[in-house]
Amino acid sequence: MTATPAATWEYDGYHPAEERLRESLCTLGNGYFATRGALPECAADDVHYPGTYAAGCYNRLTSTVAGREVENEDMVNLPDWLPLRFRLPGGAWLTPDTAPVLSHRQVVHLDPGLLERTTRYALAGHGVLSVRQLRLVHMADPHLAALRTEFGVEGDAVDLEVEAALDGGVTNAGVPRYRQLAGRHLTHVHTGEAAPGTVWLRCRTRTSDIRVGLASRVTADVPVTPGSRDLCATQRLTLRLAPGRTAAVDKTVALHTSRDPAISDPLQAAVDRVRAAPGFTELLRTHRTAWAQLWRRARVDVPGEAGAILRLHLFHVLMTLSPHTADLDVGVPARGLHGEAYRGHVFWDELFVLPYLNLHFPEVSRALLHYRHRRLERARAAARAIGRRGALYPWQSGSDGREETQRLHLNPRSGRWLPDHSHLQYHVGSAIAYNVWRYCEASGDAEFLHTKGAETLLQIARFWADSAVWDDRLGRHRIRGVVGPDEYHDAYPGAPGPGLDDNAYTNVTAAWVLTRTLQVLRDLPEPRRRELVERTDLDDGELQQWEDVSRTLHIPFHGGVISQFEGYGDLAELDWAGYRERYGDIRRLDRILEAEGDTVNRYQASKQADVLMLGYLFSPAELRSLFERLGHRLDDDTWRRTVDHYLARTSHGSTLSGLVHGWVLARARRAEAWTYVQEALKGDVADLQGGTTGEGIHLGAMAGTLDLVQRGLTGLETRSGALWLDPVPLPELSSYGFSLRYQGHWGVRLSLEHECLEIAVPPSGPLPIDVRLPDRTVRVRPGDTCRLALADGAQPGSG
């Protein structure tokens, strides 16, 4: 694998053990659907896993696991549009696993959103067959995809049989540890011919009853014969290949589902669309144009290897959450549209994704927040079910907002199915509230804040206030029975049930939600505030309770550091050196200890950042202010000791951990920050979690690395109607630039080089932008460029 600033991501040679990883990182998508980078001639097996996923298409099945009936909802692997296989007449179909491969190369061209593959097969007694393919999932028309295949021959002239197909016999089988679960989501598969050169396939999901329609048009310089086999619609042709000449086969596919707006029948819509689609050359032109527009709005310029990886990360973020997403009722799938890990569910990963999107595609952020607001009533029902007021959002969400977290999980080391208590991560509500507020601050979207945003904040705040229990002994409110971001700890050692008390991250963020919601309610226009009060039965007594709880939530400490939860300091210390010596990679320490008959609940050991997440969400000044409101002084020494304490006791079993630690260390302990930033950058491209990337990329970590440059290194905040900047010098990332969209200003350019910060505002109608640094405030008018020497002062000038 090589990464270059030339906007490509390349793999040379055929290595079966790497195929799943490559397929994930070579995925193409457009925000509506995505297709893994599998080879079109290869079917799903232990090496290859073709997969196509449409955002928000879920189905629910029941399985028998460990003697229990278990229901799971999955993002559905839709019919495979890719298949295109080839062979000599009467011979076996050629694949890299069955025929000699002389050379093989895959290149993702990031700028135009294209996947190119070239392979040379040795033909026994007939020379060499060369195969070159260009693949796109159309970024301008989200329902189209296309594949151009060019065949050539070296040596003797040969006939080549080619079969293109739409395959409706696929299952969800891309994650080995889920294979004991039911995975056949598609039913009622039918195929047919729509017109010469065009075939179709229709099916539906078993329980959610989503109807799916695909149509495929194959064009070549020879006749194309339609057919069917094994739940597949097929198109066959025979090419005469002569040395020095290339024969091309173009396959254009349209995909629709019954979830799409403005259609009647998904099959008819797919047939009509593929009929009207232009040829491959014109599709490529409009696809390139659409990608060019995305890059202009979102590009991050960083030199060297880090810049190449960041460009790849942005590519995968944009293909998962593009402007097309703004038309859909979907959330942020934690593993993108790249595979079946986490079953395609929506977690808190939007906490790491929306801050980046807010400043480039606020319409997408707004749509993702609409997904949460539409499920507000379901969240209120979940709160009522446990005897609470307000809204309890699920840790894992899918189609309708019910809790999708599995109640059992498999430890591959021990082979045992174990109880899963991660549904107790109620802090997901704080993440949603945080995103509502940050989106509105960045976009200036007062309409959303005053309506759906205020409703969402109010119900989340209400849940936290109703969850807080007064403790006379402490003279504090407490939140009991939860799980924090560190999923290793879900119970006290020997306790009869799950849950922990006073998780610091949970309590501090709950206090923030209460404080921020009170501010929003105070600032609402009076008529709107009256409407909201009437609809929610909000009274002054409840508001006073919120005020009290926001100042009195218990934050535990031990040994001069913030405790992850009450009692954390009483846990045993782990023999870290011993476990590293015995196991090497101990990222999944929980699985190691369980397989030994032990539990990580006994130890001061964390999977990922928990307390330190506070340093990721809040600037140092805001964090100090929060602790002061809660009656604690959080000085630099206390925070530094806290960082050191958890840094030594974290196994980084999540790709988000390196990101958060790098972000925090960039300000707290700069010399070590780059080690963790590199881990965040390479988490997926180097598959540091040991095989997980092949099951789907980690979207939160990818977007988070982009935001590390955008907000982490610049100290950028959008608050009080201004851009606040407090750049931190990180030698390894000392030069960077990006454009952003801020409250009606499109294409505001920020760049840092040689300790000079440059801000350029394109000509536009909106008012000037106030930029506030720790030691000065400047105003940049549309059409101007301001250069700020970080040590000396501003040098405004025309841009």
Image: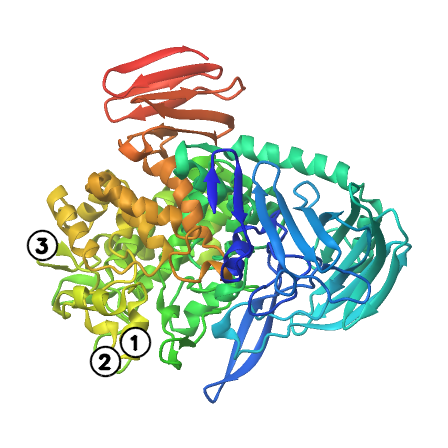
Residue position for label 2: 495
Residue 797, by quadrant, is: top left
Is 448 drawn above or below residue 590 in the view shown? above
Q: Secondary structure at mark 3?
A: loop
C-alpha gap between disc 2 and disc 3: 27 Å
Residue 749 visible in the current orientation:
yes
Residue 605, by quadrant, is: bottom left
Return the residue nearer the eye: 351 or 387.
351
Please tell me which of labels 2 and 3 falls first in the chain.
2
**Is the C-beta separation of discs 1 and 2 under 8 Å?**
yes
Residue 635, by quadrant, is: top left
**Is the C-beta separation of discs 2 and 3 under 8 Å?**
no
Task: Please report the residue visible at 40 percent of the width from the left and 81 percent of the height from the top.
Answer: 415
C-alpha gap between disc 1 and disc 2: 7 Å
Horizontal arrangement in the rendering, residue 495 relative to residue 684 (left or right): left
Q: Residues within 10 Å of mark 1 (few under 14, many from 20)?
A: some
Q: Residue furthest top?
A: 797
Q: Residue 571, image x and y in percent?
A: 15, 70
Horizontal arrangement in the rendering, residue 413 relative to residue 208 (left or right): left
Q: Secondary structure at mark 2?
A: loop
Q: Residue 12, image x and y in percent?
A: 53, 48
Residue 449 visible in the current orientation:
no
Q: Residue furthest left?
A: 559
Residue position for label 1: 498
Q: Residue 265, image x and y in percent?
A: 80, 59
Residue position for label 3: 560
Is 300 drawn above or below residue 605 in the view shown? above
Question: Hey, what amino acid is under mark 1?
Answer: Pro
Question: Hey, what amino acid is under mark 2?
Answer: Ala
